[in-house]
Amino acid sequence: MTTVDSIVISADLLWLNRNNQVRVAANIKRALNGAPQVQQTIIPAGHAMELGTKSGWIARSEFEQLQAHAASTLTAFTLAYEGTDYNVVWDNTQGAPITGEDVFDEVAGYPQLTNVTLKFLTV
């Protein structure tokens, strides 16, 4: 079970980017003699965390609660996922922090959504 702040999500969410986290920041410059100068540092926080349904679905009522939370909560909150609590903020840096598609096209929206993606940044 996944909990976003106080919102319980009944759908099973997958950690979509679990295996491609950038944990080190690095840059390279060339010295005047052409030798590479590499600088690297560990990134302690601010990791992008994406959870989603892939081909599963989530109830529209839960999706709308999450949308409202993302629109009104600009500070850190707790994300409980797979038995671990993460301190996160919504990731508004690259578009909408929560997206989804209706399972079937229907006027006023279908009761369930698929391809739901929730974007967070760890703090």
Image (tube, helix red, strand yellow):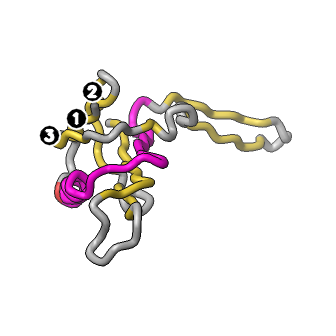
Instruction: Select label 3 or label 2 by which is in front.
Output: 3
| Magenta stretch: includes residue 53 | yes
Q: Is residue 91 magenta?
A: no
Q: x, y (%) of residue 61? A: 20, 56
Where residue 77 sits in the image (x, y, percent)?
21, 39
Query: Disc 1 vs disc 2: Cβ atoms closer than 8 Å?
Result: yes
Horizontally, residue 28 falls left or right of residue 94, namely right
Q: Which residues are magenta?
A: 44-71
Q: Earlier in the sequence, mark 1 or mark 2?
A: 1
Left or right of 57 on screen, residue 88: left
Q: Quadrant of residue 78?
A: top left
Q: Which label lies toward us, 1 or 3?
A: 3
Look at the numbered disc 3 and give the secondary structure of its residue: loop
Q: Is there CB contact under 8 Å for labels 3 and 2?
A: no
The residue closer to the viewer here, 117 or 111, is 111
**Label 3 is placed on what type of residue?**
Ser
The label shown at residue 16 is none
Residue at the outermost right position: 33
Q: Which residue is mark 1?
A: 78
